[in-house]
Image (cartoon, helix red, strand yellow):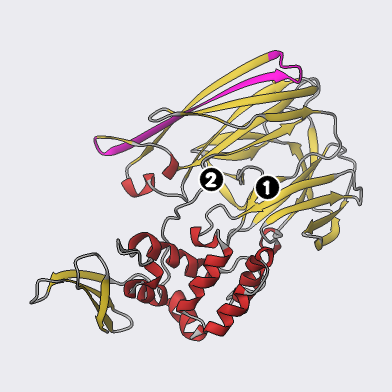
């Protein structure tokens, strides 16, 4: 059964939007200057979470970011307001969890400690007060690591490094990310770096690959990019490449030069995690559609706090890319489970995964064609056709409740 599942999940893979996504990602990046530093406040929101209005053949959304900056005694320092407009010609894009609106505001601040109180306003919907952020503008030798995409982004026909911008986190997935570690002492020719996650050391070595520049952030075509705009101080920027796929979900630490005081905390976040994986016990029970009962029971016998790890280890044996932590097969399976729960659950209380259509969908994926008709008894008939498999599944809604039973295959 496992081999069967593996073949068909990858022959007929299909991706659907997930029912759970964080609403807004925000983070601050501090780039030191001679007398004042640049504090960048970044935000990122999936198109799905914005309200788009149709205007002729376009769909238009907009948002405003309001920042009020105070000192730690609540004394007003300054405020910043900025507006963005997003346009799309595709309704499908407006409902996408994988396309994002991004923006940044640059704030010039002298050395000291501050609070940023952000308010996000969807211009077609409502206002959201975001979590207050403490910002310490200090003279530090080692700055916070920057998480960037491995692939370059175009801006005015030039290549730039794109800021990953997921709330100071690494997105858990297939895409690789690099770290850039800025150091204010440009005379250093190397640094040692240790990366620890869940008490396991996943990297320990010296970095010598670097570049010297002014690190600044800018917006271009809806993306946040790293550029050298000749402002602030120059830093030597060390590159730690290709580590993101080796990291599990959860917090991790970057320790520089074996100095425990320079222990920089980051997180690996599965931002588009299938909803059915949020509850490990329910996720294990979902395996009943493809696995033997005794295997499922052995996973259910694990302690609550060990169930998710046990589930990950189960799927690791079937992982098509075992050299990485992200498991495409596991993701595809639970994406299909999500789809069945959303589309095939019935008013009689049968969950989508337990329905006949759900079982076929999980095993074979989305059909190439779906046809609806009525039989001689006036019952609704739904036919799924898989061209490459040369198979056809016929389901009948016998009671008119939306509970389709498999009649033939």
In the rendered structure, which disc, 1 or 2, sits on the residue that comes first in sequence? Answer: 2
Q: Please, what secondary structure does the residue beneath circle 2 have?
A: loop
SS assignment at label 1: strand
- Residues rendered magenta in the picture: 56-76
Cα separation, mark 1 vs mark 2, equals: 19 Å
Residue projecting furthest to the left? 376
Q: Can residue 393 be seen in this view?
A: no
Residue in front for this viewpoint, 117 or 306:
306
User: Left of 186 or right of it: where is 150?
Assistant: left
> On the image, numbered disc 1 is attached to which residue?
147
Q: From what the image shows, is residue 282 above or below residue 2?
A: above
Instruction: Residue at 50% x, 48% y: name it.
Output: 21
Reading the image, the residue beneath label 2 is 22
Residue at 69% in and 18% down: 70
Q: Does the magenta stretch include residue 60?
A: yes
Q: At which x and y percent is residue 262?
A: 86, 44
């Amino acid at each position: 059964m496992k081999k069967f599942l593996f073949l068909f999940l990858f022959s007929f893979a299909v991706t659907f939007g997930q029912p759970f996504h964080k609403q807004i990602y925000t983070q601050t990046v501090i780039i030191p200057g001679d007398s004042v530093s640049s504090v960048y406040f970044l935000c990122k929101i999936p198109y799905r979470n914005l309200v788009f209005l149709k205007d002729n053949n376009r769909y238009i959304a907009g948002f405003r970011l309001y920042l009020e900056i105070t000192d730690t005694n609540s004394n007003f320092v300054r405020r910043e307001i900025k507006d963005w407009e997003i346009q799309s010609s595709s309704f499908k894009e407006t409902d996408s969890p994988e396309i994002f609106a991004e923006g940044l505001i640059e704030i010039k601040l002298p050395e000291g400690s501050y609070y940023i109180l952000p308010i996000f306003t969807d211009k077609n919907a409502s206002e959201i007060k975001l979590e207050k952020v403490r910002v310490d503008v200090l003279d530090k030798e080692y700055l916070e690591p920057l998480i960037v995409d491995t692939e370059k982004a175009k801006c005015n026909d030039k290549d730039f490094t794109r800021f990953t911008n997921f709330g100071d986190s690494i997105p858990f997935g297939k895409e690789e990310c690099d770290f850039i570690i800025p150091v204010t002492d440009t005379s250093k020719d190397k640094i040692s770096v240790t990366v620890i996650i869940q008490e396991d050391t996943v990297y320990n070595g010296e970095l010598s690959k670097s570049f010297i520049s002014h690190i600044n952030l800018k917006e271009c075509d809806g993306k946040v990019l790293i550029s050298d705009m000749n402002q602030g101080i120059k830093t030597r920027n060390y590159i730690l490449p290709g580590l993101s796929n080796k990291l599990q979900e959860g917090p991790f630490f970057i320790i520089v030069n074996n100095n425990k005081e320079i222990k920089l905390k980051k997180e690996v976040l599965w931002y588009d995690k299938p909803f059915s994986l949020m509850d490990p016990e329910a996720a294990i029970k979902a395996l009943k559609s493809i696995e033997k009962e005794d295997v499922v029971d052995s996973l259910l016998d694990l302690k609550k706090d060990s169930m998710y790890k046990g589930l990950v280890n189960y799927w690791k044996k079937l992982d098509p890319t075992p050299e990485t932590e992200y498991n495409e097969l596991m993701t595809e399976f639970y994406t299909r489970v999500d789809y069945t729960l959303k589309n095939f659950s019935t008013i009689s209380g049968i969950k989508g995964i337990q329905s006949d259509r759900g079982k076929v969908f999980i095993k074979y994926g989305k059909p190439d064609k779906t046809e609806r008709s009525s039989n001689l008894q006036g019952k609704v008939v739904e036919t799924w056709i898989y061209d490459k498999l040369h198979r056809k599944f016929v389901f009948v809604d016998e009671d008119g409740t939306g509970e389709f039973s498999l009649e033939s295959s």
